[in-house]
Amino acid sequence: MMKRNLHKYAVLCAVALLPLNKSRAQTKVSEATINQKINQIVKKMTLAEKIEMLHGNALFSSAGVKRLGIPELTCDDGPLGVRDEVLRFDWKSAGWTTDSATFLPNGSAMAATWNPALAHQYGIVIGEEANFRKKIVMLAPAFNICRVPTNGRTYEYYSEDPFLNAQLAVQAVKGIQSQHVAACVKHYAVNNQEEDRNTVNAVVDERTLREIYLPAFKAAIQQGNAYTLMSAYNKVNGYWCSENAYLLNKILKKEWGFKGAVISDWGGVHHTVEPANNGLDIEMGSSGPYDQWYFAKPLLAAVKAGKVPVATIDDKVKRILWVMYHTSLSANHPAGKMSTPEHNHDAYTIASEAIVLLKNEKFLLPLRTNSIKSIAVIGDNATRTFALGGFGAGVKARYEITALQGLQNKLGKNIDIRFAQGYRANYLANNTPEQNAGYDKPDQSLIDQAVALAKTTDVAMLFIGSNREFESEAHDRKDLSLPFGEQALVDAVTEANPNTIVIVTAGAPYDLTKIKKKNHTIVWSWFNGSEGGNALADVLTGKINPSGKMPFTFPAKLKDSPAFALDTYPGKNLTTPYKEGILVGYRWFDTKKIEPLYPFGYGLSYTTFEYSGLKADKKVYHSADRINVALTIRNSGGVAGKETVQLYVSKGNSVVQRAEKELKAFKKVMVEPGKTTTVTLSLSAKDLAYYNVKAKGWTVEPGQYKLLAGASSRDIRQVGTITITK
Ligand code: BGC
């Protein structure tokens, strides 16, 4: 499967804009030809036609120019898959029967795979399905840093680490764009909370911006060549992201050389002249009258009044045309396909690598299916689907295998599987707090039924966690507590059946303190896509050896997390100072020596891995060198498994503040039982640089650096030292 698509990827890249086997020089000619065509078209356009292209003309499109053959710029939401067709001027479903799509695992699930090849795979599925739906731009991937663990969109995003985010974002973008569909990377930038998201001003120092919040965007633009980018709702350092000259003109377009179009988040524009001059290209939003929008009649008037140069308007139009010539107007544009068996299989593969084994103290997993006669499947999440829900984008999934269905598919013939609901998920994202009141209370009669069932079976599986209503765009959770009285259910069922397995389905950190202490078997799953239930059943039964690792730190308590420890969330007077600076996620916990509940990068396997022999290819490196680090991984257990080897770097005695350690490389490898493999991790000495605020650039500080290779950020198995010279 992987090979099939990787091959296809290579071929498609080659034929994207020119016939096969053309030289690089000719590729450039091809770009030049495109630019020539674009210039010719723009010369023929009236100012009014140009302005029409710069703002929405419906919920998910902006106008083209029919007489010149310029199509509408159509777009659709990700990142969980290609959203169903909504009405042109209303969020209601258009009622199509051809828009059922593949539901792909959510962003933090993708990050938990630690597998960039799967992010590429994800991108291909999105691209193929977007083509089937004739969408030019896909509003994905989304990868804001997980700064606030209660952020309602944590599930959509990847991780708390800029490097992991960048590796995944680049591949997701490349995958989408290999199908001649534009990725729209979002939300640029520093959009780390939903509370006050439309108004909050994130105050971030320059170094933190450069080291934590921008690297994945930079990589998506420079390495991934993302064709479009979405400006975020919030302000950064006093300026709305949609009119932030520093973020858009200076960094994105000038420094990073972004050639594509900047699209506003929906309704995220506040003026005409400022965003027009400061780097925004297209205004999008949710309701008309469209000709009254900032980038419609008022923009025309502003140009006529000389407040926005015509050259600036031309530049925006050229950017949009450039996107089109690489997508809908490109040569060899693929037709697209929808929810194919291959797509389903890709969703399965991602899901199966995303599941994280948190605890397996009694080796209850993988299940001994030969001797187990009965299983109690307990909990609302066992029968719930996650493709849709709450506020924000979802997918009309062609199908979604629930956890219960997955288990029945796999074990139903030989094992008596019985279900009890266990708790009521009485919570809707769009309800008022009053309407949701009492959602956290246990339902004693459901608990009693669950306990009665659990007493009669060999194994009890508890499906708890959250759902797509409880984790939702436009809302943050108020704390880390498990909802719906789940803890009471866990306590009661655990008491009733000694073979209780807790399976948490969620997209963000929760407080599992008591469960971690009292329960011997804990598995973490996600909003895991169309094949989520099948992937989970295969992990529980050992067909798949779990290999997911946590993409974020689980704080033991919310106050341990930097934004809460420093009382900067959600901010005062609509301002949130990022006082923790570069110490986000594990960088904070490690530097401040705070024990997390589960550390970044944590996840167990049904086998064990031994690390040995870490060796860098040199002892001393120049700041322009590459650093190659090799180590040996031995599968010392009884079954084949995948391990993600994580390489962190630590700089003591630095001239600037440093995090205790920072992730600089990782690799996921498959190792057969009893076998060893050599893992080589490669980084550039430049990757060790800090952002030097005075010099306004990156500085590689000379001196000693520690190389820390491990199975998680807190399970360092091998240490080495290298020296960097000037
Ligand atoms: C979200 C974007 C999304 C857009 C269109 C906004 O509310 O922030 O991520 O793409 O709506 O649905």
Image: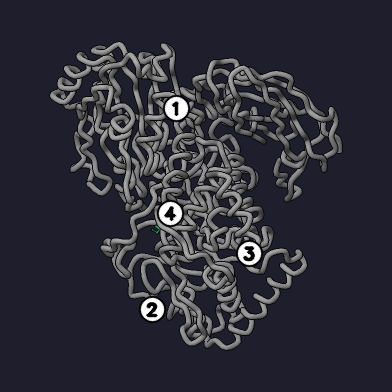
Residue type marked 1: Lys
Residue type marked 2: Asp
**Chain-order first, disc 3 or disc 2:** 3
Residue ID for mark 4: 78
Q: Is residue 86 above or below residue 516?
A: below
For the residues labelled 1 and 4, the Cα–Cα distance comes to: 30 Å
- Secondary structure of the residue carrying tag 1 is loop
Residue type marked 4: Gly
Is 609 or 691 nearer to us in this picture? 609
User: Residue 15: which quarter of the image?
Assistant: bottom right
For the residues labelled 3 and 2, the Cα–Cα distance comes to: 39 Å
**Label 3 CA crowd tier, 10 Å (few <14, some 14–19, many 20+):** some
**Chain-order first, disc 2 or disc 4:** 4
Residue under the image location 27 percent in, 38 percent down: 384
- Secondary structure of the residue carrying tag 4 is loop
Q: Is residue 219 above or below residue 512?
A: below
**Chain-order first, disc 3 or disc 4:** 3
**Label 1 CA crowd tier, 10 Å (few <14, some 14–19, many 20+):** few
**Chain-order first, disc 1 or disc 3:** 3
Is 88 or 289 nearer to us in this picture? 88
Q: Is residue 81 above or below residue 580?
A: below
Mark 2 within 8 Å of ligand 1, using the beta carbon: no
Q: Look at the image and tell me whether residue 636 can be seen.
A: yes
Residue ID for mark 1: 543
Q: Residue furthest front?
A: 413
Residue type marked 3: Val
- Secondary structure of the residue carrying tag 2 is helix
Q: In what quadrant does ligand 1 lie?
A: bottom left
Residue under the image location 37 percent in, 35 percent down: 534
